[in-house]
Image (tube, rainbow, N blue to C red):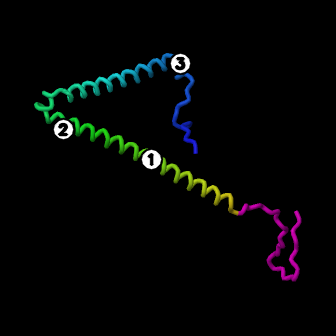
Amino acid sequence: MSNKLDSIVINNPQRRSWGYRLRDIIIVSATAALWILFITQTYLTLTSSNFLQEQAYVLQILKLTAMDFVAVFVILHVWVLYERVLFRLKMRSYRRSMERQAAQPKLEAKPAEPQAVTYPGETTEYPKYVSR
């Protein structure tokens, strides 16, 4: 099964210009640089021996931050998996309803047959047909 994102990704030719691409590259680069600076600063701070002796509470804060990050990451991924399963179940239900609808007998109109018409007060054994 191929996983295509046609319905999610916006296919807009105006957003393929170099201005938009340059903007996106700058945003991604700035985000990556900030993460690298954060990780480097944290590593350098944790490797100094004075820091470990003097500020143990900061280590606890870092541990809590890391656990929060992992928890949010797991929750978001579980939510995405849940939405995928929900979508597949809805599609399966839709396909089954379409199959049931296709399996039902078709109703066809038949031409009307002439009806016998009796008039009040007539007591004949054979009804008269009305021709128009």
- Count residues near mark 2 (Cα–Cα under 10 Å), then give few for <14, some for 14-19, many for 20+: few
Q: Based on the displayed image, in which of its 4 quarters is residue 121 positioned?
A: bottom right
- Looking at the rendering, the stretch of residues picked out in magenta corresponds to 105-132
Task: Please report the residue visible at 25 percent of the width from the left and 28 percent of the height from the top.
Answer: 43
Front in this rendered view, residue 22 or 34: 34
Give the prevailing secondary structure in the magenta stretch.
loop
State the image coordinates of residue 130 (x, y, percent, origin top left): 87, 68
How far apart are labels 2 and 3 at the CA level?
47 Å
State the image coordinates of residue 124 (x, y, percent, origin top left): 87, 82
Judging by the rendered image, the residue that carries numbered circle 2 is 60
Judging by the rendered image, the residue that carries numbered circle 1 is 81
| Looking at the image, residue 117 lies above or below residue 63 | below
Q: Quadrant of the N terminus?
A: top right
State the image coordinates of residue 83 (x, y, percent, origin top left): 46, 47
Q: The residue under label 1 is which amino acid type?
A: Leu
Q: Is residue 67 left or right of residue 97?
A: left
Of the image marks 2 and 1, the number of the one nearer the N terminus: 2
Of the image marks 2 and 3, the number of the one nearer the N terminus: 3
Front in this rendered view, residue 11 or 51: 51
